[in-house]
Amino acid sequence: MVVVVVHLPLLLMKLPLKSYDTNFHIFFASHYVSHWFDPWNPKWYAGFSQTTYPPLPQQWVALVSRILGLDMAYMAVQLAAIMLLVVGVYRFSLLWVSPRAASIAALASVFLGSESFLVYSAGQLGTTSAAPIYLNALPFLFEWVRHGKWQSFLKASVLFTAAAAAHHATLLFGSIFFAVPVLALALLDRQDGERISTPAFVGRTVTIAVVVGVAIAVVLLPFWIALIHYPVTQTPIPHPSRANYILSPQWGLNYFIVPYGALILALPFIFLRGSMAVRLRPLLLGFWVAFLVGLGGTTPVGHLLLGRAFDVLTMERFSYWATLLALPFVGLLAAELVDRYRMWAVVGLTTVAALSCALAVGWATYRPTDAEDFKVDSVATWLNRDGHDQYRYLTLGFGNKISRLAMMTDASSVDGEWNSGRMLPELTRYGAGALTSSKYFGEPGLDALRAMLKHADHYGLKWVFVRDHYYDALLSFAGWRQVDSLEDKTITVWGKDGVPPAMPVNAPQIPPHWQGLMWGILPFGSSILAILVILIPEKRRHERRADQHFATDENLKQGRLVS
Amino acid sequence: MSKGRLFAALLAAATVALVVIGTVWPVPSAVAYAGGASLLRSSSTPEEAVANLGDEIRMQAWGKAYASLANKAQFTQPEFVHDLTGYYSSLRTYATVENFEVRPLHASADEAEIELKLHWSTVVGASVSTRDLHVIRNGDRWEPEWPIAKEPIVPPQVIPVNYLRWDVIYRGPGDDWGAQDVEAPHVRIVDMHPVERADGVVILGELLNEDVVPAYVSVSATLLSKSQSPIATEGSFDKISHLLLPKQVTPFLIKFPNVALSEVGSIRMTPLSALIAASADPVIEIENEQLHPAPGASLTGQLINQSGQIVNVAHVLGTFYDKTGQVVWVADEYIDRALLPQNPVPFEIHIPEDLARNVSSQRTVIATYSSGGAQ
């Protein structure tokens, strides 16, 4: 109910549309609407394969869009992910803390700054969809490893696979930050109640790892094939989440203060309680590593642990995972504060939670990804008429509106927003992001733009839409001439004579039909299967509560959990 | 202390230590976003003081850069900023400093001369500007003096414009540029030959507009192997003047990186021309042109804008000929300052050392861009 009260109005206002990546996900979904079994999308990078990004949330958006339209379908899927997070946090927290503390942790997840930051500023639908599925899978993992329940094995396996179908990185790093602490917990608890031998523990762990590994390999097979054939070897693109947040406080505000919010106040408690309760130490260590990596370049940890991946991944997702790992502690802290200070604690906690959420939601307005909102309808109309779409186009100064434009036009662009999916050497060589924002990447960005313009004839690139006159001089000297203007002359259309119509390129990367079928059936099918297996009624283990220790204040005082 | 508290203390200490390490010895990505090394660098030597200034200019921290100057009383901060970025819209206005070099020229106990070479990234390519800074000691710190160059003020005047102008009447609003149902202007490649360079094959040549109307021109070339299969196709891009008035000639240069001349059997040249509205204005006069022999071979001179409008960007294309009149090399330079009317602006085009000895004459062509209309 709280989720609905807090997030539904914001989603109905389509606030995520202002974020970095929301339009990117909707663009992918728009392709699935009309080409469910054909992941080859010719609208970006002169053609690229959508098998380079796990499809689950986007396919759900595509499906729901049949009823709600693409924008509202996105909002509906995002809302479902937020609701699923509440359940996931509760179930995950229950492994570590009391049901009361777990309930508070679940409630806190609604106000989590990092969740709002990813939903409303970053627009990371993949991450925010995969994490809740993953969190929901972890208790089943525990049940399987600890008690050997085959039903839990089935549920954990299916949920892990569905999580991977939503976002591959979450599964990869989630295994380290989330699953390893849960396995450690099962190991710590092995002597309590129903005992488990170490060989059984190892056997069960290996079994599920192998089965889930195989399932993910099959479900995302086209993704792995694309990755193996065309590994991401392009020059890394700078991202401010890798800055040192002390030396660059503006990025510290963006990637630490806003996502963590009032959680920063709980850090001493997390360290202290997590250290003192032996049972909580795996969770603390998982949090600690995710926390350090999420600090980007503030510490050398991310650089050392991730190696080259540090320059490829963005760090805000690690902070997100760290805050999820912190929630059981938050529930514990809140429960103890309420016990001690009653109404004062309730008022105080509610206030800081609301402020954290409000800051993260409002951040999208105070630090918008695009300085100006503008319509691209006229550009799409221009491209769609008089055979202009026989040629490829490029935009300059359009920011993340290029996804919106790509949805509305039939024409193909040489640019795009999915950097890992691009194969054109002019784009991968220089270490810059989208061409439309070339100037913000300094010399690498402008080198990439010039390289692309030089090969305009090869790509059938005839049209350049300019909304930033910074680029006019280059176009003029490179042989383009202004041919039209749109939107009250705020957008100019430049054309180059002698450019041949666009021909298909990147042909070797086009996935064969069988991969398209797999891509259309298996990832989405894994989510359907997950829903079905979750509906299998759980036989309640009454003894579970009895043999489970919770790291409450009382327990600590009695010394039961103190090492 | 219990084991738990000790563990907490260890984790907290390790966290603090890692943050300190990450701040004192930041990873490369963190250094880039923090504006270089200047945050952790004092100004205890003349080189450090100038390097700090370079970092601040790179980060466009104009206030900090201005505050660090010893002679800031001689000019205002806006004048300092305009000196770096230009008083009028130009390539430099939106350029960013990609990196810089600091080179000591002379030093004594209380003052030093330091060369600051700024490598700018502009929309048309890299641009370098060099300033020699006088640095003076102030207590235990060194402070650079900025050699401000104030833009000359052009006196109010009336300049008559009576240059030729050509307009093109199109079929109607639905007619796209380039889709012209008229014969294209007659253009001809008057010289062309390939040259092998270290990074590949370069095709040099000249294109003449033989017609009596202005032409938009470009040239592309396809290298064919000895079996006549295409090796690569490239265009002249910006190494050409795309606007040719009647009887005008432009040089062109087309690069084919990573291709050896021995692989090439023949070359297919494709000149392209189209009718275009044009004006002979603005006229840019070239004065004091001089060919400097190797070492440091270059062509220098001054551009004078003879028109009444400001030219925001000028592109100087130099064609170099040997004694037989054959094109030896084509080189260019973008002027990163706006050309004000009647205000001379120097240019310098570098010539490769190995080719310089063959150069006996040259011809210079100027292409211009004025915001609001390309020429």
Image (cartoon, rainbow, N blue to C red):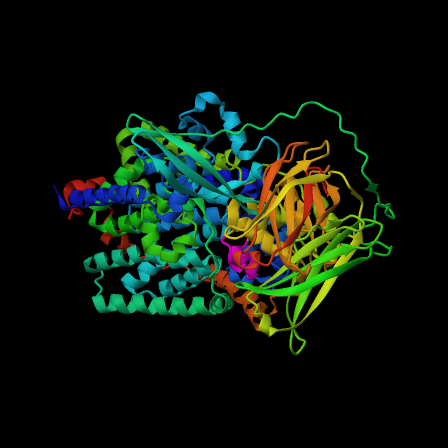
Residue A397 figure quarter: top right
Q: Is residue A383 magenta?
A: no
Identify the residue at image location x=39%, y=42%.
Answer: B103
Image position of A480 with respect to A375: above or below: below
Q: Residue furthest left?
A: B1
Identify the residue at image location x=36%, y=37%.
Answer: B106
Q: Residue furthest top?
A: B73
In-front residue for pair A442/B257: B257
Residue A139 appears at what percent x and percent y?
34, 56
Residue B152 figure quarter: top right
Residue B335 figure quarter: top right
Image position of B199 with respect to A316: above or below: below
> How many marks are shown on the rendered structure?
0
Residue A455 appears at what percent x and percent y?
63, 59
Q: Is residue A428 magenta?
A: yes
In-front residue for pair A255/A528: A255
Q: On the rendered structure, is A111 left or right of A94?
A: right
Assign the N terminus of chain B to one quadrant of the image.
Answer: top left
Q: Is residue A257 visible?
A: no
Image position of B116 with respect to B323: above or below: above
Q: Is residue B105 visible?
A: yes
Assign the C terminus of chain B to one quadrant of the image.
Answer: top right
In-front residue for pair A81/B176: B176
Which stretch did the figure color magenta?
A418-431
Residue A256 appears at what percent x and percent y?
38, 40
Identify the residue at image location x=40%, y=50%.
Answer: A88
Residue A465 appears at what percent x and percent y?
68, 47
